C-alpha cells in the first residue's frame, strides 16, 4: 500500500475538501474540517463509502461541480438495484484517457497498433474507455463493440487488427471461432487487453495460445473512472496502479482495518483528482494483495496482485465458504480440464447440493469417468465438501459476448 507521506496527506485533504463541495459528502462529512486530516489515523477514521451509498445518491447527488461543468455521465448496469450515476468533467475525461494510454504503453502497445475494441458502449464505461486511450496514444481505434462475431472476424482480417480488447469470455469465444474456421494465419493480433471480469490461469493460457498473443489484465470500475486505472506489465501478472490519480488501501473486509502487505484483503480507493464525482474510501469489494519490491520493468508505480475474487461473491455451501477463484485454482491444476466450468447450487430434501460441470477434450467414457473422480476428490480435499461432478465436451457450456455467469444459486 502506498505510504502516508506528507505530500499524500496534502493530496488527501484536497480530495476530501473537493468531495465536500457536493451534496453527498457535504452531508456525510458534516462538521468535518478537511485541514485537520494530518495523520494516517485521521484519514482512516473517515467512514467508508459503499455502492449502496452511491445508489442512495441517485441520480446526481454525487456531483461535486456545477452542472455546467458536467460533460458526460456513465452508469453501472443497475441489474441489482438502482443504478449508480457517475458524472464526469472535461478534466475527468482527459485524466481517464491519460491513464488508459499509460496502460497501453505499459503493455507495449504503440501508435502503430490497430486496436480492436469489443466491449460495450453507451452508459457502460468499457468501450469508450478503450477508445479514449487509443486516441490519446495515437493508435487506430476500431470500435466495433460487442456481438456480431462474423463481422468482428472479418474486420479483424481486413483491417489487420493487432490488439484485441475484450472480456475474457468473449476473447475465448473469438479464439475458438478463429480455430474452428482455420483463419489463424489471417489474423495479425499480437496483444490482448482483457478486463471486466476475473479470469483464471487456465483460461489465460488458452486464450494466449489459441490467439497467439501476449495478454494483459486491465483493471478498473465504473465508480473510479472505468477500466484503465491499472494494468500488469510483461514481467508479472501483478498490476501497476496509477497512484498519481488515486490512493488505495487494502483492508480486512470484516474489520475494516489495514492488512499487512502481502495478505489478501479488500481494495479501497480514494480519488485524488476526480472533479465530477470524487470518492473517499470507496469499498470496491475486489480481493487482492499488495505486491512488494521493485518491478523489472522499471515502473515506480506500486503493484497489486490480479483480482482474486470479490468479498461479496462469497457463497456458503454446506457450511463451507466458497469463492469462484478457489474453483479456478483447483481446476487449473488438473490436466485435461478446460478453463470453462459452471456451478449449479440447489437445496433438495433439506440439503445443499452443488453440481460442477466442466469441459474436457477427453471423449473416451472410461477416461472421462476417471477425470470426474479426480475433480471430485480434489474438490473435497481443497474446498471441503463432496460435489456432484459432470464432464462435458468442449464448447458445450454457454459462451458469452460479455461477462460469463459461472455460478447459479437456485436456493433462494
Image (cartoon, helix red, strand yellow):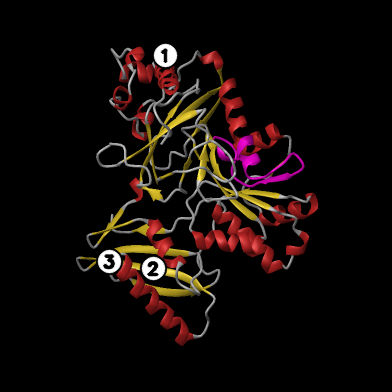
Callouts 2 and 3 close, C-beta under 8 Å: no
Q: Secondary structure at mark 1?
A: loop
Vertical arrangement, residue 134 with respect to residue 4, above or below:
below
Residue 45: where, in percent of width, then height? 28, 25
Residue 227: where, in percent of width, then height? 54, 39
Q: Residues within 10 Å of mark 3 (few under 14, many from 20)?
A: some
* Residue to which mark 3 is pinned: 384
Residue 164: where, in percent of width, then height? 66, 50
Q: Residue at 58% of width from left, 21% of height from top?
A: 91
The Cα–Cα distance between marks 2 and 3, rounded to whole angstroms, is 14 Å
* Residue to which mark 2 is pinned: 356
Q: Residue at 52% of width from left, 40% of height from top?
A: 240
Q: Residue at 74% of width from left, 53% of height from top?
A: 156
For the residues carrying marks 2 and 1, which lies nearer the camera in this image? 1
First in sequence, mark 2 or 1: give its number.
Answer: 1
Q: Is residue 124 visible?
A: no
Vertical arrangement, residue 354 with respect to residue 295, above or below:
below
Q: Is residue 236 magenta?
A: no
Q: Residues within 10 Å of mark 2 (few under 14, many from 20)?
A: many
Say the numbered circle drawn on residue 178: none
Q: Secondary structure at mark 3?
A: loop
* Residue to which mark 1 is pinned: 21
The Cα–Cα distance between marks 2 and 1, rounded to whole angstroms, is 50 Å
Q: Which residues are magenta?
A: 101-127
Q: Secondary structure at mark 2?
A: strand
Amino acid at each position: 500500500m502506498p505510504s502516508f507521506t506528507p505530500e499524500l496527506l496534502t493530496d488527501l485533504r484536497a480530495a476530501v475538501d473537493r468531495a465536500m463541495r457536493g451534496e453527498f459528502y457535504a452531508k456525510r462529512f458534516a462538521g468535518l474540517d478537511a485541514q485537520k486530516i494530518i495523520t494516517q489515523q485521521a484519514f482512516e477514521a473517515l467512514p467508508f463509502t459503499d455502492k449502496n451509498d452511491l445508489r442512495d445518491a441517485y441520480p446526481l447527488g454525487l456531483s461535486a461541480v456545477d452542472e455546467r461543468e458536467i460533460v458526460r455521465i456513465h452508469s453501472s448496469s443497475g441489474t441489482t438495484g438502482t443504478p449508480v450515476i457517475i458524472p464526469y468533467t472535461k478534466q475527468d475525461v482527459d485524466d481517464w484517457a491519460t491513464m488508459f494510454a499509460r496502460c497501453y504503453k505499459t503493455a507495449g502497445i504503440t501508435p502503430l497498433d490497430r486496436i480492436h475494441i469489443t466491449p460495450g458502449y453507451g452508459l457502460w464505461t468499457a468501450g469508450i474507455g478503450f477508445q479514449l486511450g487509443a486516441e490519446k496514444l495515437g493508435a487506430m481505434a476500431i470500435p466495433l463493440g460487442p456481438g456480431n462475431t462474423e463481422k468482428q472476424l472479418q474486420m479483424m482480417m481486413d483491417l489487420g487488427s493487432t490488439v484485441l480488447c475484450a472480456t475474457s469470455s468473449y476473447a475465448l469465444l473469438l479464439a475458438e471461432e478463429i480455430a474452428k474456421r482455420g483463419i489463424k494465419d489471417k489474423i495479425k493480433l499480437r496483444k490482448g487487453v482483457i478486463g471486466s471480469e476475473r479470469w483464471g490461469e487456465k483460461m489465460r493460457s488458452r486464450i494466449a495460445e489459441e490467439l497467439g498473443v501476449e495478454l494483459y489484465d486491465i483493471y478498473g470500475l465504473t465508480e473510479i473512472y472505468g477500466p484503465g486505472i491499472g494494468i500488469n506489465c510483461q514481467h508479472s501478472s501483478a498490476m501497476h496502479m496509477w497512484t498519481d490519480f488515486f490512493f488505495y488501501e487494502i483492508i480486512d473486509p470484516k474489520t475494516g482495518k489495514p492488512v499487512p502487505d502481502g495478505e489478501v484483503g479488500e481494495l479501497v480507493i480514494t480519488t485524488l483528482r476526480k472533479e465530477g464525482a470524487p470518492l473517499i474510501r470507496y469499498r470496491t469489494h475486489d480481493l487482492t494483495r499488495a505486491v512488494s519490491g521493485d518491478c523489472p520493468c522499471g515502473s515506480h508505480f506500486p503493484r497489486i496482485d490480479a483480482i482474486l475474487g470479490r468479498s461479496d461473491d462469497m457463497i456458503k455451501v454446506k457450511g463451507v465458504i466458497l469463492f469462484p477463484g478457489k474453483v479456478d485454482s483447483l481446476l487449473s491444476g488438473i490436466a485435461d480440464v478446460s478453463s470453462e466450468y459452471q456451478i449449479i447450487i440447489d437445496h433438495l430434501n433439506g440439503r445443499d447440493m452443488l453440481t460442477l460441470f466442466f469441459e474436457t477434450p477427453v471423449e473416451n467414457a472410461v477416461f472421462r469417468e476417471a477425470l470426474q473422480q479426480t475433480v471430485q476428490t480434489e474438490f473435497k480435499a481443497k474446498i471441503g465438501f463432496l460435489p456432484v461432478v459432470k464432464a462435458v465436451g468442449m464448447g458445450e457450456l454457454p459462451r458469452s459476448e460479455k461477462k460469463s455467469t459461472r455460478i447459479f444459486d437456485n436456493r433462494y
